[in-house]
Image (cartoon, rainbow, N blue to C red):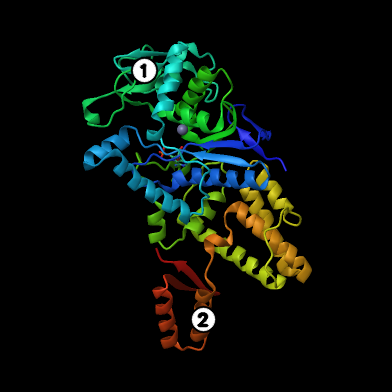
Amino acid sequence: MHIRLYDTLSRRVKTLEPYGERFGFYCCGPTAYSFAHIGNFRTFLAADLLYRVLALAGYNPFYVRNVTDVDDKTIAGAQREGVSLYAFTSHWEDIFHSDCVALNLLPPDCEPHAVGHMEEQIALIQTLIDKKFAYGREGSVYFDVSTWKHYGRLSRLDERELRMGAEVSSNKEAAEDFALWKAYKPMDGSIFWDSPFGKGRPGWHIECSAMALKYLGNNFGVHGGGMDLCFPHHENEIAQSEAATGQPFARHWFHVAHLCVNGEKMSKSLGNLYTLAEIEQKGYTPMELRYALLAGHYRQPLNFTFESLHAARKALERLERFGRKLQELAGVEVPMASEFCSLAPAWDAICDDLNVPEALGRVFSHVHQCELNPPVQVQAVNEWAEWQRLMFALGFHRNAMEIPMEIEHLAQERLTARKDRNFTRADSLRKQLEAFGWAIEDTADGYRLQKLR
Ligand code: AMP
Ligand code: ZN
């Protein structure tokens, strides 16, 4: 099965052509200086979905998602707290990873750090200087945009917009030139690296080029990130990578539209953000957030509301109920199916530019049909196997929602106690569940269990 995906460079939906043994996919990762907000997670969830779909469709993906651990914000944070850069960034990275686990994001095949790739970045900058695409000024090195005639092709901005979007610095030759290496400033304290260009640190863009080229080769499958990275980050990555290697960089560019609040991009600078911890404090689960963020098409901006989490809860409950029913009807444990048959329409929609809203529509109409005409045992075995495959594709699979059998039994017992109006027993069962780390909440049609963190 081939996947079709919108490519920002050609502005077309194109088939992803498999190549080589592993299909390289690079997604720009978090900057480790604070909590990732749920807007960041919209992008990482869409990347996770693409990774899962590539794997299921047989592309054998190799997924790289970096961690930006050196930039103005991480350096300032470490200085402010009087700790090493590593101590500062690893704290935020640990929180990021535990959010990723809660949201059921698969770990990437490789998660490289900028600090761990100084040699590669310095070598790449040296190549650009040697090939006359870059010049040094007062200990900094800049990419000379006038040497790269394709500059602006990805973002399709005109010259004036390219200049306006560039970082301001007094010693560049032209406003649109961008930093590859930043000279040391006293405010950087003890955080600097030695290089042939003087002491300092790499600019942000060069890290992704250096790490993508190292792990995925000069020319690889898909490169992605949030829409705001299109310019200048990805435009600069293309210029410096292609100038250095003389070969096309990523074959396909994948950009995820923003998560918004009241029509404005959710961002740290606007202060209109929510973290996963805040969503959980309001009583919603990471899985419900996963559903709500994936349910909108990744190319459309998505307005975040608590109603959408509420709707996600209802939808997941229905999916879970249906899955349990299938499992019950099947009566035997079966492994995940190796292909789709009755759920093929939903899978086809996912493979067509990750059209999750369409896929979910098709899933629910299938669920509805099966509720009207429950499958007989033989059919249920196949349905259950396929269901597991689809839930894995969307990351709603049971592992993440897995409730241990004994916990389920206690919850069932408590439900019976409540129905019998034996509230003392129900309360004692609630306490037992809590002691095992599970909160229970009563709902109209039963209960809901949630792992306490
Ligand atoms: P950062 O940690 O700021 O480097 O961002 C990590 C990723 O989140 C990047 O791919 C950004 O483009 C993406 N991102 C930032 N804000 C949003 C948002 N409101 N909606 C979707 N993606 C976002
Ligand atoms: Zn990047």
Question: Label 2 amino acid?
Answer: Leu
Is 242 on the left or on the right of 426, as rendered? right
Q: Position of residue 322 (x, y in %)?
A: 64, 67
Q: Which mark is residue 415?
A: 2
Name the residue nearer the viewer: 444 or 215: 215
Residue at 52% in and 25% down? 155
Residue identified by numbered label 1: 141
Name the residue nearer the viewer: 24 or 379: 24
Q: Position of residue 7 (x, y in %)?
A: 61, 32
How crowded pointer 1 is (Cα within 10 Å; few <14, some 14-19, many 20+) is rated as many
Q: Position of residue 426 (x, y in %)?
A: 44, 83
Q: In which quadrant of the rendered image does the N terminus lie?
A: top right
Q: Position of residue 216 (x, y in %)?
A: 55, 32
Separation of marks 1 and 2 at Cα, in angstroms: 67 Å
Question: Label 1 amino acid?
Answer: Val
Residue at 57% in and 65% down? 317
Give the answer, above or below, for where 262 lies relative to 191: below
From this viewpoint, is residue 274 visible?
Answer: no
- Name the element at disc 2: helix
Is 85 on the left or on the right of 9, as rendered? left
- Name the element at disc 1: strand
From this viewpoint, is residue 10 visible?
Answer: yes
